[in-house]
């Protein structure tokens, strides 16, 4: 598996990361190198091995359905650059 | 079982087109707290007051799954005969939008909690068995809802309220088994009914607790599936049907004029009754899903699933069959009384007042669907808010059954009950509405009526048998409607003798 410059630019765009042409040129071989290393892993036959989803031997903990949080609006919007009337203000996004 | 609507077709210039519909219904799970945080889910609070630092996606926050959301999703799955996956997992669906501070939605792509199931629908609500069809459900998974954007509060900004952000949703994905707008509406109606019986979602489409993404494609009958479009967030039964009608016609027009359908996300504009492409979602299907490293796989024990199953109420299909087969109700009454859980609960409370429910079931069902529904309709009340309780209704119907009052008087008594809240027996007693079944008293009145109308008696005996109704009317009138009509009929027939 490998990526070309178009793919790099597309992924950058989807991730909202600004990437210049020169950076994209540099990223292509870099990413392909990484993909190459990862690909080496597929040389190992693990068709009979359960996929490991977490490194800790633990079970998912569940929470009771009780309201224990909220009513902290000031904290929630503390870092918002344009909060108004308790809302976050963002550049107009409309379809 | 056949379905007349399966013949729904779009008439194009090149012939007939078939429509194929699949629905992804997002149903808000009824819980106190959110899917992964302890913030409240209550509707209508001040903006951003029901937001925890987890929902606001502050750095370092970790999601902890709400057990009730799991339980309700499993119960919903069991209610539609679906496979319950004892192993499921959460994935991140990555996209950027102002209503989603995490930058990803926690969802379940690869291992949903519920697998394939099915829902029986009907196009004829009055006789559901006559026009039934089975719609497959592909899966149900659990995911987070996003926040809410408001565009009309400020000239240059949109406002963001994150109260809804992180509320638990079930996404219920149907198979592309529907072929007409009516079938799609019947499916959503039935799904809503089941969710409300189960108690996993309140089904309130106006408040947005249930909304659908509508997938539509067209094809010539017998052809392979065409390319589909997905119209997002449609929030009423009427709009769902309008979207299908509009999209199907638009697609036929595009194809017949030489174009191709692009697989895309569209938006419904109810004011213009049209769908539009959402260009901003061009990359919408490029979500770069991956397992959420913050959450371990969800593993369910057999006991948990067993308890979920045991906690299910009798569901609408079973209930309808029992009303028909055991209680002897008409197909229509059985369907009407079971469509909404609240109606069935009310009806059953009424039946619980007797040891032999089969005896009163039919008359109670008729009374409920005509008298009670009529009154509630006029007052704009739902059945839970009925001013007359099931026990009070049973008292009223009991008075009719034992002949104390006639059906006609019962209507009058019911009206007084609605106004005053008094019991039926008390009203009958106080207003002297008790029916006269004493033959002696009635015979006396009949004799008076005949004496005052000798000419009509002669005409009747001369062959004008239509006059019988006149004598019934006069007798009832003289007794202020309180005579037992059956007794009046019998006695009149006897006294007048044969007509002609």
Image (spheres, coloured by chain):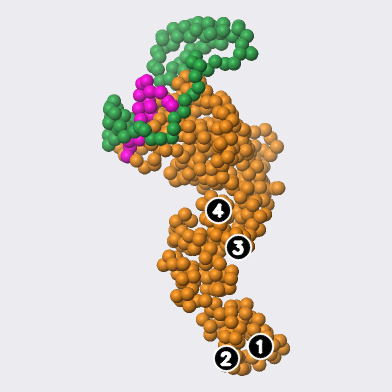
For the residues labelled 2 and 3, the Cα–Cα distance comes to 37 Å
Residue beneath disc 2: B448
The x and y percentages for residue B131 are 66, 50
Give me the chain that's orange.
B
- The mark found on residue B495 in the picture is 1
Asked if labels 3 and 4 touch by Cβ distance under 8 angstroms, the answer is no
In three-dimensional space, the C-alpha distance between marks 4 and 2, rounded to whole angstroms, equals 49 Å
Q: Is residue B51 magenta?
A: yes
Residue B368: x and y, percent?
54, 61
Chain in green? A
Q: Is residue B391 above or below residue B106?
A: below
| Snapshot quadrant of residue B155 | top left
| Badges 4 and 1, same chain | yes
What percent of the width, then of the height, locates residue A68?
Answer: 36, 33
Mark 3 vs mark 1: which is more N-terminal? 3
Q: Around disc 1, counting alpha carbons within 10 Å, would you say few (fewer than 14), some (14 to 19), or many (20 or more)?
A: few
């Amino acid at each position: 598996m490998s990526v070309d410059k178009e793919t790099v630019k597309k992924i950058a765009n989807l991730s909202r990361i600004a990437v210049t042409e020169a950076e994209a040129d540099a990223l292509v071989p870099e990413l392909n190198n990484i993909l190459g290393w990862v690909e080496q892993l597929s040389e190992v036959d693990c068709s009979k091995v359960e996929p490991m989803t977490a490194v800790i031997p633990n079970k998912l903990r569940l929470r009771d359905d009780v309201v224990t949080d909220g009513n902290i609006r000031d904290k929630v919007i503390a870092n918002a650059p344009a909060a108004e009337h308790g809302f976050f203000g963002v550049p107009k996004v409309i379809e | 079982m056949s379905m007349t609507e399966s013949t729904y077709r779009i008439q194009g210039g090149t012939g007939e087109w078939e429509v194929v519909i699949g629905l992804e219904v997002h149903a808000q799970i009824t819980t106190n707290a959110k899917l992964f945080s302890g913030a409240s889910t209550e509707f209508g609070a001040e903006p951003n007051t029901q937001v925890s630092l987890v929902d606001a996606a502050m750095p370092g926050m970790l999601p902890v799954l709400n057990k009730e959301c799991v339980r309700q999703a499993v119960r919903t799955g069991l209610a539609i005969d679906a496979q319950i996956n004892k192993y499921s997992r959460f994935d991140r669906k990555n996209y950027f939008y102002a209503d989603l501070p995490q930058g990803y939605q926690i969802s379940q792509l690869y291992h949903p909690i519920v697998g394939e199931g099915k829902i029986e629908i009907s196009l004829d609500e009055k006789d559901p068995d006559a026009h039934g069809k089975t719609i497959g459900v592909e899966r149900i998974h659990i995911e987070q809802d996003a926040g809410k954007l408001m565009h009309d509060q400020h000239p240059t900004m949109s406002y963001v309220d994150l109260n809804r952000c992180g509320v638990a949703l079930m996404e219920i994905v149907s198979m592309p088994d529907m072929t007409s707008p009516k079938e799609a509406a019947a499916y959503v109606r039935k799904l809503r009914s089941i969710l409300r019986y189960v108690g996993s979602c309140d089904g309130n489409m106006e408040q947005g607790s249930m909304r659908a993404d509508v997938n539509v494609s067209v094809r010539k009958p017998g052809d392979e599936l065409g390319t589909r479009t997905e119209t997002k967030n449609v929030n009423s039964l009427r709009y769902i049907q309008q979207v299908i009608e509009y999209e199907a016609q638009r697609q036929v027009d595009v194809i017949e004029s030489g174009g191709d359908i692009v697989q895309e996300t569209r938006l419904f504009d109810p004011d213009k009754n049209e769908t539009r492409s959402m260009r901003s979602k061009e990359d919408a299907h490029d979500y770069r899903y991956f397992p959420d490293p913050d959450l371990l796989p969800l593993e369910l024990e057999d006991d948990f699933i067993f308890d979920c199953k045991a906690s299910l109420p009798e569901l609408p299909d079973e209930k309808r069959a029992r009303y028909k087969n055991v209680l002897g109700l008409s197909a229509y009454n059985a369907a009407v009384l079971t469509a909404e859980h609240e109606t069935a609960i009310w009806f059953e409370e009424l039946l619980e007042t007797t040891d032999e429910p089969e005896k009163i079931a039919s008359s109670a069902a008729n009374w409920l669907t005509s008298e009670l529904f009529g009154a509630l309709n006029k007052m704009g009340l739902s059945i839970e808010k009925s001013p007359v309780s099931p026990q009070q209704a049973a008292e009223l119907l009991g008075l009719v059954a034992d002949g104390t009052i006639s059906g006609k008087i019962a209507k009058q008594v019911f009206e007084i009950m609605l106004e005053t809240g008094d019991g039926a027996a008390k009203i009958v007693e106080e207003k002297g509405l008790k029916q006269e079944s004493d033959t002696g008293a009635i015979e006396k009145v009949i004799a008076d009526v005949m004496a005052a109308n000798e000419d009509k008696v002669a005409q009747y005996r001369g062959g004008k048998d239509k006059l019988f109704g006149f004598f019934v009317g006069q007798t009832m009138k003289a007794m202020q409607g309180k005579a037992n009509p059956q007794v009046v009929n019998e006695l009149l027939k006897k006294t007048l003798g044969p007509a002609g």
